[in-house]
Image: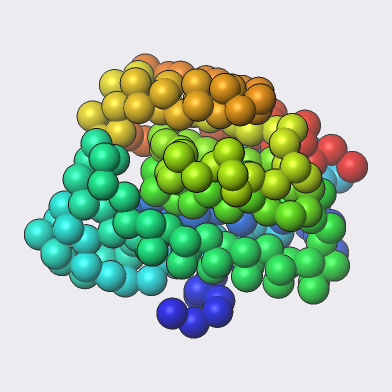
Amino acid sequence: MSSFPETIELETGPHPDAAVIWLHGLGADGSDFVPVAQVLGLPPGLHVRFVFPHAPERPVTINMGMRMRAWYDIVELGGAQQDEEGIRASQALLEALVARERTRGIEARRIVLAGFSQGGAIALQTGLRHDERLAGILALSTWLPLAHTLAAERHAMNADVPILLAHGEEDAMVGIERAAASRRALEALGYAPAWHTYPMGHEVCPEEIADIASWLAGVLRP
């Protein structure tokens, strides 16, 4: 893997002083959430650089070994077996993207890590272990990966980082109970994630987009 994945970028104003690095789900690419960012309607004074990386292509076990864009391999849907090597490799890719934003003048406290499905898992994996305080973690239709290592690996700088967990009540791909268990695991370690559910499947909906916009405006308030 290269040190930086290819990305799509969208800026809401000149000279952005905040960044949202947004990871897509399995089989999609960086363009997947560009339309969502375009309709968020953030406050006009909030100049944000949205960074949408493309995951590397790799064989995915649950899809009969077909190669597709994926942040790591998924062996089975329940999460009992996890591709720890792949998860940590994508964590390193996301850390590299954070470091790049820092070199572009964005403070860590002005960076949000976001993701959908397995992209959200990588956002949680990385953000909770990051050694500089971040603005927040946005985790959509996802779960907490490598939960058994978090207590030992988490970083105190993000012990109270704002976290938004959002999930579809009818999600057949990532059941809502799995997401709720992840929320409880975070709460057991002292985190206080915001929790929103919606009458939808493994997708996003207008109500959720409005909640994302409100949350982003709050954590990125100048």
What is the total number of numbered labels drawn onto the structure image? 0
- Residue 130 screen position, x and y as percent: 68, 53
Residue 89 appears in the picture as rendered = yes
For this view, does 126 lie left or right of residue 221?
Answer: left
- Residue 81 screen position, x and y as percent: 26, 47
**Residue 17, quarter of picture:** bottom right
**Where 195 sits versus 145, above or below?**
above
For this view, does 13 lie left or right of residue 149?
Answer: right
Q: Quadrant of the C terminus?
A: top right
**Where 24 sits versus 65, above or below?**
above
- Viewer-closest of 150 and 30: 150
Q: How is the image coloured?
A: rainbow
Residue 10 appears in the picture as rendered = no
Q: Quadrant of the N terminus?
A: bottom left
Question: Residue drawn at (79%, 73%), measured in percent from left and top?
Answer: 103
For this view, does 120 lie left or right of residue 82?
Answer: right
Question: Residue drawn at (46%, 67%), measured in percent from left and top?
Answer: 89
For this orientation, the residue located farthest to the right is 222
For this orientation, the residue located farthest to the left is 64
- Residue 145 screen position, x and y as percent: 43, 44
**Residue 128, quarter of picture:** top right
**Where 38 sits versus 96, above or below?**
above
Question: Residue drawn at (43%, 21%), measured in percent from left and top?
Answer: 180
Question: Residue drawn at (16%, 52%), measured in percent from left and top?
Answer: 62
